[in-house]
Every structure is written in structure tokens, then in C-alpha cells.
Amino acid sequence: MKPYQNKILKFLTKIPKGKVATYVQASQATGVNSPRVVGRVLHNNPDPKRFPCHRVVFKDGSLAKNFAFGGDRGQRALLKSEGVSFAGKKVDMLKHRIII
DNA sequence: ATTAAGGCATGAA
DNA sequence: GTTCATGCCTTAA
């Protein structure tokens, strides 16, 4: 059993639409005090359709280079479609960052 | 202001 | 010990 993985995936589902979470927030919310672990779980994402890994971004709002949905480019489109605003290349964290 | 690179820290496989 | 969808730091252009 991988409790951290289960918690992280569950954390993804509880991210409201139009909001984004940072790796740090996800790691702290799940008790896994390491953003890298979160990133690994997202990469091992068993079902991208159920777990919106595209809602997890860097602390500064930038996106990962090789995203499972078609690169950072595709992720930007997905988030934008959900109502997330973008400041150039980065997500507008001030408005869409979830409050833990 | 932004990008790139290098280094160090953290936690798990 | 090494790697990794990170974070923060510094240096450079």
C-alpha cells in the first residue's frame, strides 16, 4: 500500500475546477513533505481522466516540461478551458491557487 | 523582468 | 547510490 500515493490522487480530485494546486501544497496536504514525491505519483498517474494532474503546477505557476496531456502547451489549454487565467507562460496563482 | 544553468535539500522507488 | 513532472538559491546574459 502506498498511502502517500492514494492521498495525493485523492487530493487531485478535491481540487475545485478553475483552481490549481502547487506541488508543495499537495505534498503538505497529503503529509508527504516532498514535492518530488508528488511529481512522481502524478507521473505514475494510473488514470489521467480521473486525476487532473494538469491542475498541479510549480510554485511560481510554471508547468512541467513533459506533461502527460500533450506537453505544457496542452496543459495550458486544459486549464484555460476550465477558467484558469494565465499570466503569459505562468498560471495566475494569485487568483487560482487553492487555499489550504 | 525572464531564461538558463549549477548546486543543495527532501522523500520514495 | 541514483533518479525523479520540485523548491530555493546564486550567477550570468
Image (spheres, coloured by chain):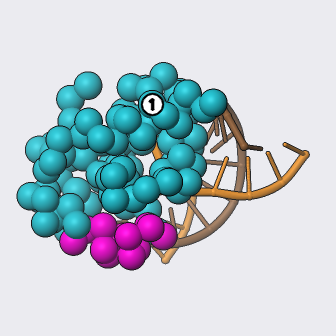
Chain colours: A cyan, B brown, C orange
Q: Position of residue A11 (x, y in %)?
A: 35, 35
Q: Is residue A57 visible?
A: no
Residue at the spot of label 1: A7
Q: Quadrant of residue A1?
A: top right
In this orientation, which residue lies closer to the viewer: A10 or A18?
A: A10
Q: Quadrant of residue A54?
A: bottom left
Q: What residue sits 49% from the left and 53% below the top? A: A45
Q: Is residue A72 visible?
A: yes
Q: Position of residue C5 (x, y in %)?
A: 53, 56
Q: What residue sits 32% from the left and 75% below the top? A: A73
In this orientation, which residue lies closer to the viewer: A79 or A88?
A: A79
In this orientation, which residue lies closer to the viewer: A70 or A65?
A: A70
Q: Quadrant of residue A62?
A: bottom left
In this orientation, which residue lies closer to the viewer: C3 or A17?
A: A17
**In the rendered structure, the residue with mark 1 lies on which chain?**
A
Q: What residue sits 26% from the left and 61% below the top? A: A90
Q: Position of residue A71 (x, y in %)?
A: 40, 74
Query: How crowded is the residue under tag 1: few (<14 C-alpha within 10 Å), some, or many (20+)?
Result: some
Q: Which residues are magenta?
A: A66-77
Is disc 1 placed on a helix, strand or loop? helix
Q: What residue sits 26% from the left and 36% below the top? A: A14
**A40 inside magenta stretch:** no
Q: Position of residue A51 (x, y in %)?
A: 36, 50
Position of A20 relative to B12 (above/below): below
Position of C6 relative to A76 (above/below): above
